[in-house]
């Protein structure tokens, strides 16, 4: 079943069939929970919104609206546990705000097919990065003994542009960058990227709202769903078998990428 969402840009209501909406709610909850570990749920949620017939730019913007709630839900448990050093992360938050605002502004200048191509290529790239990139075990503790570097700040800024433009796989690569450039522990980097992503998705959402691209009715439902999924995931999903989660996640992303590319050919 295909559904159409005109969003705020068209001034209309979200015409999403009840069955499709239920499917989206279930999908967004599960991917938000798993996304606490994988950090790449937009690689699934946005392409699925495309398949439901939602306008490409509205899909990206509305997903970002929901991501803001998800990021907040995923960050709260880390804040409560005392594992985040907010003041030390402020320079990273600053460059992220600038980069993500720029990335979101670029969405308005890209065609719908262009967005689909970017999403498809990003999906494949993140799958390859996840399969071939370095693997580290999750460890407990705070953000840890780390220090800022110029290269790390530059990488954070460049990744923030992509994070504001689409965000699929953004947190996954950002986590790896924090480990590589700043010397954070893997567990500490996961906690840090959750907070940074609140600001990345938040500023991008404000830009999308200004552009009139957010479907607020659909976004509100999905936002609450993603908040609940991420909050639950921060407690429960991290205790599950990560190899099993990675396998399902990668297979799903790869299949969706092939489907999107086939649609463009």
Image (spheres, grey):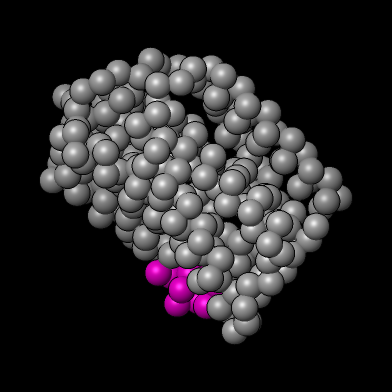
At a point 21% along the width and 48% down the height, the residue shown is 91
Q: Quadrant of residue 82?
A: top left
Magenta stretch, main secondary structure, is helix
Instruction: Please tell me whether residue 131 is drawn above or below residue 207 in the rendered image.
Output: above
Residue at the extreme left of the image, as rendered: 87
Percent across and percent down for residue 171 are 43, 40
Instruction: Point out residue 117 in the picture as x, y percentages from the top left corner.
Output: 70, 51
The residue under the point 41% across, 47% down is 228
213 up-or-down from 247: above or below:
below
- Residue 115 in view: no
Q: Is residue 210 magenta?
A: yes
- Quadrant position of residue 256: top right
Q: Please state if 185 lies on the left or on the right of 129 as rendered.
A: left
- Residues 62 and 120: in front is 62
Which image quadrant: the N terminus? bottom right
Q: Can residue 16 be found in the magenta stretch?
A: no
> In this view of the protein, which residue sits in the foreground, 177 or 244?
244
Counting every numbered tag in the picture gives 0
Residue 9 location, x and y as percent? 59, 79
Q: Which residues are magenta?
A: 206-214
Q: Position of residue 12 (x, y in %)?
A: 62, 82
Residue at the image point whose x is 40% and y is 29% from the top: 236
| Residue 121 seen in render | yes
Is the residue 93 above or below the residue 193 in the image? below
Residue found 40% across the figure and 16% down from its top:
136
Q: Residue furthest right?
A: 265
Say which of 240 and 169 sits in front.
240
């Amino acid at each position: 079943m295909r559904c159409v969402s005109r969003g705020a840009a068209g001034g209309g209501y979200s015409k999403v069939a009840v069955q499709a909406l239920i499917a989206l709610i279930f999908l967004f909850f599960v991917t938000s929970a798993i996304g606490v570990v994988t950090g790449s749920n937009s690689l699934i949620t946005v392409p699925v919104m495309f398949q439901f017939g939602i306008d490409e730019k509205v899909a990206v913007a509305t997903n970002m609206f929901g991501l803001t709630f998800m990021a907040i839900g995923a960050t709260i448990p880390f804040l409560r546990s005392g594992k985040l050093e907010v003041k030390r992360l402020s320079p990273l938050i600053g460059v992220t705000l600038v980069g993500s605002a720029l990335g979101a502004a670029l969405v308005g200048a890209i065609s719908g097919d262009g967005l689909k191509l970017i999403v498809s290529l990003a999906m494949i790239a993140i799958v390859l990065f996840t399969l071939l990139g370095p693997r580290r075990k999750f460890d407990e503790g705070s953000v840890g003994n780390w220090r800022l570097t110029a290269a790390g700040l530059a990488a954070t800024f460049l990744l923030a542009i992509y994070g504001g433009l689409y965000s699929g796989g953004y947190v996954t690569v950002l986590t790896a960058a924090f480990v590589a450039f700043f010397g954070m522990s893997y567990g500490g980097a996961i906690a840090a990227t959750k907070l940074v992503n609140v600001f990345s998705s938040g500023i991008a959402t404000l830009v999308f709202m200004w552009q009139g691209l957010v479907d607020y009715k659909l976004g509100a439902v999905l936002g609450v769903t993603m908040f609940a999924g991420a909050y639950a995931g921060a407690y429960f999903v991290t205790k599950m078998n990560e190899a099993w989660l990675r396998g399902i996640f990668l297979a799903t992303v790869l299949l969706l990428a092939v489907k999107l590319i086939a649609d463009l050919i």
